[in-house]
Every structure is written in structure tokens, then in C-alpha cells.
Amino acid sequence: MIPAIEVLYVQSLISRKGKDLQQELLFFLRIANLGYEKKIRIQWAGKNRHWRILGANFHSVASDGREYWVAQAKFKEAHEDKLPGDIEFAVYYRVYENEFWEDNAGHNYRIKADSGVRLFSQMPLMILGQQSHLKRNQKYVQIHAAVHESIDPQKVYLHWTADQWKTTRQTPLFCRKNYWKKNNDSNAANPNQYGYGIWTTRLKVGNDFRMEYALACEGIEEIFWDNNVGENYKASRDPLTILILNLHCYQEKNQNFKLQQIAKAIQDLDIDIICFQEVAENWNDGNGDWESNSAKIIWEHVGKPYKLYTDFSHLGFDRYREGVAILSKFPFLAKDSKYISDSDDIYSIHSRKVVMGQVEVPGMGVINVFSVHASWWEDGFQNQFENLRAWAKSKHSSEVVASFLCGDFNIKAGSEGYAWVRQTQEYGDQYLKATSPDTFARVFSGQVLDWKSDLEHDGRIDYIFMENNSLLNVMSGRELFTEQDYGRVSDHIGYLMSFEPK
């Protein structure tokens, strides 16, 4: 039976930097996930026997569905005898009406002051502070592990992969006697009085998107493992997120508020790439008015580090330069714009220009993104899509890992225009794949004759189509700017999708 509470390890250090001494306490727990509303507290006392309560916070999800929680506290004093010193503690866990205690069978858990790390699990070795997230531009990962002398460690190493075990790597860890002095200005011994030594290494992950790893220790007679309860430890970067939204060409009431609301959602959700359609600015005799450009206004509200690329197609609503835009968190490696329609008459609504941006996503590679506002089927969609498809193909190269056609295509799901995209067998509807994978498989398999019936209640005309040979997978899809989610900002809703490498 899985216990409700496991005390994995505790750390106690006294740092001697500066005028005041500082004692740091850290408690690392594994908790059974018995419900959403949890309260986890450390009840502890130092050498003065004064009992205190310290709240724990969620750290990460364990691979078996349990959760890691951590509690930390720091105390500063001019004299060491005023610090908490040696401590004892127990753990309290409340979820709904259920309460649990873990107090070491009534004896409480204990750790000496300035002793480093003490493990309380049955394992003789453990990775400390499991890292599950890689920052976008992070190139190295520092790994720390505690290993007990009783297993007579001859060789400690990480067994790891960055390509889902297609290839494997081994990286050694080292135990240095001055570890605590160097890292925390502490007098803790390494190994310490409990027999635990801290072993460390620095992994070079470079531009890898994800890594999976386990800790191994070769003793004299056997190999010991910490492999996260058989599931290995995993760390990855954030997925690529792309939003598509038609801005409705300055036809909205409370327009300024809605533009600010779009910027707020981009900031709150930390969206990487945004493709806008019906971007508008004042016509001004065809010369435009940059200060009134709706994509520019959103960009100014969002701020750094985003880059904007926009271009106009034609006169819209008899008073605006109407066009498309790409807002990107990543710098543009290349930009281009092109009419995909036969007409390039700026006074014709049938003149349709697309903007293209190429960016490099850390951990993934180079991608091409096209922001598209195509005509209806009867107004030339078929020819426009063929021109777009040929253009996207010409922009593809061996370094490009994915090509995205994003925006308002003016073709209803299941319609004649949608069928045309499907029959090319080059692009797939990513929102459908993310939210209805079985339906996606039926529609895009090319083997189901009545596939249109699967989409008869799907009223979308806005899509992200990804080229089928792309090296990315869609992971999630959601509607944005609905009545329940940031409010309506246009006559279209937005679609936000996330992608990871295959």
C-alpha cells in the first residue's frame, strides 16, 4: 500500500557568510495525491523545544502520480546558540476531511544542525531536488545525489538519454569533501555523520528538448539504482505555443480594452507565437498610419522580448489598410510577404497577402510560420491554397523542423475547401488532432469515405495546419477569448495550441 506521506530527505546547514549566521532547513516529501485541496505542514522544534509549524508547497508531479512537496525555512542570528540547532519534526497532511500524520512511528524525525543531508527513505541513494523543467536557453543541468557509505560506492553515474532511449549516455558523478564549504560556506562534512555523501555532476544538454535519467551506483557486489520508482526522472523545456486570432478589423466596441485584453492573455499565458488576421490601421490615402495599427498596439502592450512583422493586403471596410501579422517571442531569422491570390489590387477584397516568419525555437529547431487570411471557396480559396502550399514548400529546407499555415482560411470544417486541404495529404488540422485524436485519425487517414459526418457540428474556419513531415507533435489545443476565457474580443475566437518534438 502506498503511504500517504513519505519523508524522503531533510537538509540542515549553517552558513557563515556575512556578519550573521544563517541556518537553512529543507524538507522534501512525497505525498499520495488523494485530492486537489491539500494542506501539508511540518511540525518541528529546535533545541529550545518550542514547536513551530512550517507550510509545504507543491514541487512537481512524481511519475507514478504522487507528488513531491517541499518546505523551506531560513533563520539569521549573530550567535549560533540562538539558531534552531538540532531539530525534530513530524508531517501533517490534510485532504478534504482526511488527516494523516507521519512521525516516525511515534519517535519523530531528527537531524543534527549543520549536518548536510539525511535520507529517511529505505533507499541508500537518491537524487536531490529533482529538476523537471529546463529553461528555454539552458545548456547545462546540475545534478546532486546523496549516496550512503554502507553500499561502498565505487562508481556513481547517471544513465540518461535525450532521445527517448534511442541512444544512451553515462555521465560520472563525483564526491568532493569540500562540497558544503564551497557551495554553502558550511562546516558540514561530506560524507557526514549519517554516512551520506553528496555526489554531483554537470550534464551538457545543449539544445535537447527533453532528458530522462536514473542514478546508478556500483558497489562491490551489486549495482544500486534510484530510477524514480521505476519510471525514471524526466525534465523538459516548455512546449512551443501558437495562437491564431482574427482581430475583426477595428469593428469591435470597446476596441482599446479588447486589444489590451489580447495583450494580457499573451503575457499571462506566455504565448510564443501569435498569428493575427484582419490587422487594421487607418487608410490615410493608402499610405497607412502605423500608430493606429492594431497589431502594433497589442505589441506595445505586450512589450519585450516580442518581435512584430506585419503587412497589408487591401482596403478593408472602406477605411482601413487590412492585413496580417506575426508576433514572435523569438527573433526572426527570415521574413517575407506575398500575395497568394491572383489579384494584387489593394482596392479588391479578393487580394490576399500572407506574411511568413522563420524563427529558431530553443530545444526544437527552425520553424516556418505563415499567417494566412484566405478567401472563401467560391472566391478563389483553391488556387490561393495551392499557391500557399507551393510557397511554403519552396521555403522549406533540411534545417526546418516544422512548417505551420496559421489563421483564418474561410473554409468550414468538412466543407469542400477543407476536403481540398485534406486530399493534398500534406497538412493536418492540429486543433482537431489535439482535441479529438480519433476523429483526426478517421478524417486524415484517407481511408474513411464518410469522414465529413465526423465534422458536421464543427463550425471552425480558423486553423493551424502543420506539414505532415514536420518533426513536432501537437500536445494540446484550447479555445481562447470566449465568454469564459478572457472574454470575446472579436467576431472570431482564438485557438491556442502547444507543440513538442516527436
Image (tube, grey):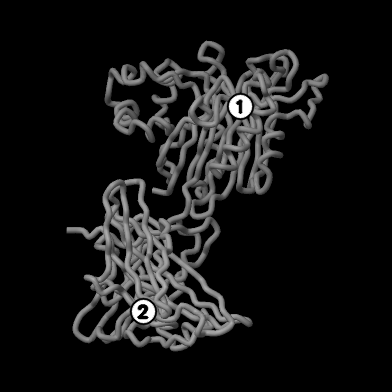
Q: Secondary structure at mark 1?
A: strand
For disc 1, the neighbor class at 10 Å (few under 14, some 14 to 19, many from 20) is many
- For the residues bearing labels 1 and 2, Cβ distance under 8 angstroms: no
Q: What residue is rendered at 25% in x and 83% in y?
A: 151
Q: What residue is rendered at 57% in x and 40% in y?
A: 273
Mark 2 belongs to which amino acid?
Ile
Identify the residue under disc 2. 111
Determine the CA span between mark 1 and mark 2: 61 Å
Using the image as rendered, state which of residue 434 and residue 374 is in the foreground. Answer: 434
The residue furthest top is 378
Asked whether, in this view, residue 328 is left or right of residue 183, the answer is: right
Asked whether, in this view, residue 165 is left or right of residue 84, the answer is: left
Residue 142 in percent (x, y) is at 46, 71
Q: Secondary structure at mark 2?
A: strand
Using the image as rendered, state which of residue 145 and residue 349 is in the foreground. Answer: 145
Would residue 232 be visible to someone looking at this image?
Answer: yes
Quarter of the rendering occupied by the N terminus: bottom left
Q: What residue is rendered at 58% in x and 32% in y?
A: 371
Residue 13, relative to residue 414: is it above or below?
Answer: below
Would residue 183 be visible to someone looking at this image?
Answer: no
User: Within the image, what quadrant is residue 235 found in?
Assistant: bottom left
Mark 1 belongs to which amino acid?
Gln
Identify the residue under disc 1. 277
Q: What residue is rendered at 67% in x and 24% in y?
A: 255
For disc 2, the neighbor class at 10 Å (few under 14, some 14 to 19, many from 20) is many
Residue 369 in percent (x, y) is at 56, 38
Q: Which mark sits nearer the N-terminus, 1 or 2? A: 2
